Image (cartoon, rainbow, N blue to C red):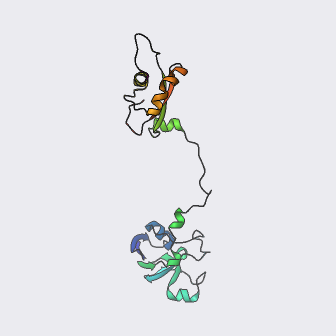
Amino acid sequence: MSKKVTFNPYGLTIEVEEGENLLRAALQAGVHINASCGGEGVCGKCKVLLEEGEVDSLPGGLLTTEEWDLGYRQACQTKVVSDVVVRIPPESLLDRRTLTRRRAGVGLRPSPIDLAALKEEGLYNPAFKKRFVKLAPPSLTHNVNDLARLEEGLARQHAVDSLTLDFYLLRKLARVMREQDFQVTATLDFSRRRYHSP
């Protein structure tokens, strides 16, 4: 038969089977109670205050006689018998910051990244991409300026439809193209404009 368990100060209520222990009921409700021993009953940190209802729990253990008389119980050693209301005292609340706090070097291990798999799934799309372009040298039949030659090569070989070049690079373009025999690698910034690239 199911029983209702209400956890204060949250006001959360959950239905559990009769005989379920309060620590597991709290976890099912999403209420985190400090239980560093994992519910074995040996740390005494999962104290709760019984406000209403009946539970099955034995005196002694890690609770003082005074705590027992006030209605305190160890959540991990207490079974639900009827509908109950329990209050979680501040010292038993699990500090949520401990769930997210990390020490330097603990749990932060590098793992290899499979770039090919990321590319296939469309998850790897860097802003800067290098594109190798093999250009035809100037001739009497194809006499265009070097920037137009580069734009044509990128459009034909890599489907880059437009190009913006810094003045500093424009000044070096003619010299670099000739030194490299019109076979150059262009580094493109795809974050500024939306280019169509394979």
Q: Position of residue 26 (x, y in %)?
A: 47, 70
Splitting the image into 4 quarters, where does residue 123 fall?
top left
Q: Position of residue 71 (x, y in %)?
A: 49, 85
Residue 30 image-quadrant placement: bottom left
Residue lying at the far top of the rendered structure: 140
Judging depth in this view, the residue of 9 and 183 nearest the camera is 183
The C terminus - image quarter: top left
Q: Which residues are magenta?
A: 142-146
| Left or right of residue 47: residue 29 | left
Say whether residue 95 is left or right of residue 154.
right
Give the mark count.
0
Is the residue 60 above or below the residue 136 in the image? below
Q: Dividing the picture into quarters, in which one does residue 127 lie? A: top left
Q: Position of residue 112 (x, y in %)?
A: 58, 43
| In the rendered image, the vertical position of residue 55 relative to residue 101, given as above or below | below
One can see residue 21 in this view: no
**Residue 143 magenta:** yes
Q: Residue at x 41, y 30 (%)?
A: 197
Name the image quarter holding the N terminus.
bottom left
Q: Nearer the viewer, residue 169 or 81?
A: 169
Q: Which secondary structure class fits the magenta region best?
A: loop
Q: Position of residue 162 (x, y in %)?
A: 37, 29
Taking 60 as reference, is 130 above or below it?
above
Near-viewer residue (63 or 190): 190
